[in-house]
Amino acid sequence: MIVCAFADDRLELTVRCVEAALQQEPAPAQMIVVVDHNPGLEAQLRERLPAATVVPNAGDRGLSSARNAGIALASADVVAFLDDDACPHPGWLAALLDGFSDSSIAGVGGRANANWETGQPDWFPDPFLWVVGCSYGGQPDAGEVRNPIGCNMAFRREVFDQAGLFDVNIGRLGSHPLGCEETEICIRAAREIPGARFALVRGAEIDHWVPASRAEPRYLLRRCFYEGVSKALVRTLGDERSLDTERSYVTRTLSAEIFRSLISAVTGPDREAGLGRIAAVIGGLGAATAGYLYGSVLFRNRQAPGDVVKQ
């Protein structure tokens, strides 16, 4: 099991995450904590978490590189990942492992519940919970998916052996809210490993911390913009089906949310909240579209899918 950490202000959250993971039944075969270029935090975590293997990320700064550093130390047949600000429920690991009973399943994930520091704002639409790293309204709890959510996922070791590691040119870098590293590796694995599939499983739930700073419209717009940038990069690495999930999300999930919010704004007691959710959907979609267009130009000469190096 791998947890990646980088921020001093997440120390207590990271300790809570790792301790909850160590209490799982069955217990993880390994507990690896990779600290991304923060020697002070590394020293504190090594002291606070004696049962874990705490190591630095010796590669480039960033989440993908830190995950790769953990994979290099992992020896189990299944490698699980948790975000440092997530807290797994009892039974989480057992549910993830049960998801691999089907030999064609290459990776699994579970539900991520939003644990808001200040409560979910009335204007914040449930279909945009992915913005804060959580399962969104309208997302299935179980079944086959293109990719699991990054804060709560596990892969067979052979995915990394056959398809390569996380692309270090994709994903979160410090406070820059880029993403899609798990999307890209799943698309690549499905292409490289015949018959490989990915699924969500029930029972593998976590609570994902959402700080007050993310309960602001400007964060939603910024995150949506960078998600659009990330999707543009994923599109250059995949084929025309790479963004099928996003097309369905826009045409079905967001359309349904606008309809519900419009009804609420017209007939319900929370008129302002309904109008706020409509504005958030339109603004978020617009920001993501702008990011996608920007990224399409930025990554026009990005390497072809087959050029990803197997590290």
Image: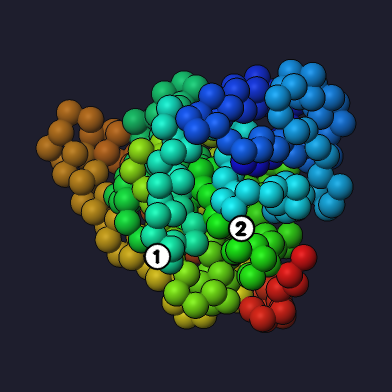
97 vs 299: above or below: above
Q: What's the amino acid at mark 2? A: Arg
Label ID, residue 235: none
* Foreground: disc 1 or disc 2: 2
Res. 99 visible in picture: yes
Q: Does 1 appear above or below 156?
A: above
Mark 1 — residue? 245
Q: Earlier in the sequence, mark 1 or mark 2?
A: 2
Residue displayed at 23% across by 30% down: 270
Q: Residue placed at 71% from the left, 36% from the top?
A: 33
Q: Which one is in front, 289 or 309?
A: 309
Occupied quadrant, residue 171? bottom right
Q: State which quadrant residue 267 falls in.
A: top left
Nearer the observer, 269 or 197: 197
Expressed as whole percent of the image width and height from the top left, the position of residue 262 reads 21, 46
Amino acid carrying label 1: it is: Thr
Q: Which residue is drawn at 39% across and 60% down?
A: 102
The residue pinned by badge 2 equals: 157
Q: Quadrant of the C terminus?
A: bottom right
Which quadrant of the figure contains the N terminus? top right
Residue 206 visible at all = no
Give percent across and percent down for residue 93. 48, 38
Position of residue 27 measured from the top left corner of the image (x, y, whole percent): 55, 32
Q: How crowded is mark 1: few (under 14 residues within 10 Å), some or many (20 or more)?
A: few
